[in-house]
Amino acid sequence: MPITVRDSQPVKRNIASLVGGVVIAVGCFVLWVLVASQLTQWPPSPLITAAGLAVALGIGVWIRVADL
Amino acid sequence: MMSSRQAAFRAAYRAQIAPAYHGLLHVALIYAIGAATIWYAAQHIHGPTWLEWLVVPVSVILANIFEWFLHIQVMHRPRRGFMGIYKRHTLAHHVFFTNEEPFHDTTRDYRIVFFPPYALIAFLVMASCGGFVVSALGSSNAGWLVVCTAAGMYMNYEFFHWCCHVRDDRIIRHLPFVNTIRRHHIAHHDTALMMTRNMNLTYPFADWLFGTSDLDRGMLGHLFNGYDTRFIRREVPPVAAE
């Protein structure tokens, strides 16, 4: 396997982190809604849902930026 | 002792880890998702019968065999559609960690120790499908127990794998199961064994069952072997992995 040592930070991110970021964001949002519905009511309030959306988006973006 | 090839690979790999990556955040995300899943599933279990509880050991055994199958047939075999997994595991993880130097140095190395979090999501979706089938067969409790067990096994897998690659073993060398899998997995990182032997990462049950262990002893001996090297096969014959 060829190895290239870079002096600077990576420019190109792996496509897997893009797919992974989307999958994680969707998964986290679904889990957030399910847990929130268990703790409060079904469906969760718009505020809780919006918070879940923000958290899920944040995690998804981090996965992409961290190229994880 | 670390070879120059391994040292060069580690330097190259670390140089390509994105600055935004944080190992502890990676681990926290995995365990938060796993814990939330277990909690949510557990809320739906009400007074399970002993028969329903039986799905837990059955699920543990099936997860153990699945872990073995995935490792030997996907992570160590170039399969169309799964090349990313093969490259990440055989061509990266096994070069970064060898049986001569199997330990990580910093939390940034967690990127190559732990699976990416979307693997957990994929596993939970599969487990949920299994739970749905079990539930449809007549027991909602059993279905939710399948989900709980699967999520627990995934976190078990990640924790045990981390224990295999952590340098300081003052505590874990005394922990049953953990010391067993640590020796088992470090031996697997020997390039002579890695394609065919010691494929379990939690409990070496499937390796014992399918004869892919480097040990020559019974099931209980496998599970509680610890660091014992007396039962290692003198000659490890090649295994037909196909």
Image (cartoon, rainbow, N blue to C red):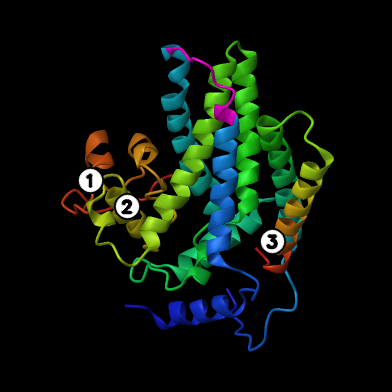
- The tag on residue B225 is 1
- The one nearer the camera, B13 or A60, is A60
Q: What residue is rendered at 60% in x and 32% in y?
A: B40
Q: Secondary structure at mark 1?
A: loop
Please tell me whether residue B198 is drawn above or below residue B13 in the rendered image.
above
The chain holding disc 1 is B
Residue that label 3 marks: A63
The reply to whether the C-beta atoms of the residues labelled 3 and 2 are less than 8 Å apart is no
Q: Which residues are magenta?
A: B41-49
The reply to whether the C-beta atoms of the residues labelled 2 and 1 are less than 8 Å apart is yes
Residue that label 2 marks: B184
Q: Secondary structure at mark 2?
A: helix
Please tell me whether residue B74 is drawn above or below residue A34 in the rendered image.
below
Which label sits in the foreground, 3 or 2?
A: 3
Question: How many residues crowd around disc 2 within 10 Å: few (fewer than 14), some, or many (20 or more)?
Answer: many
> Which quarter of the rendered picture does the N terminus of chain A lie within?
bottom right
**What main secondary structure does the magenta stretch of the protein show?**
loop
| Residue situated furthest right in the rendering | A46
> Which quarter of the rendered picture does the C terminus of chain A lie within?
bottom right
Q: Amino acid at mark 1?
A: Asn
Q: Earlier in the sequence, mark 2 or mark 1?
A: 2
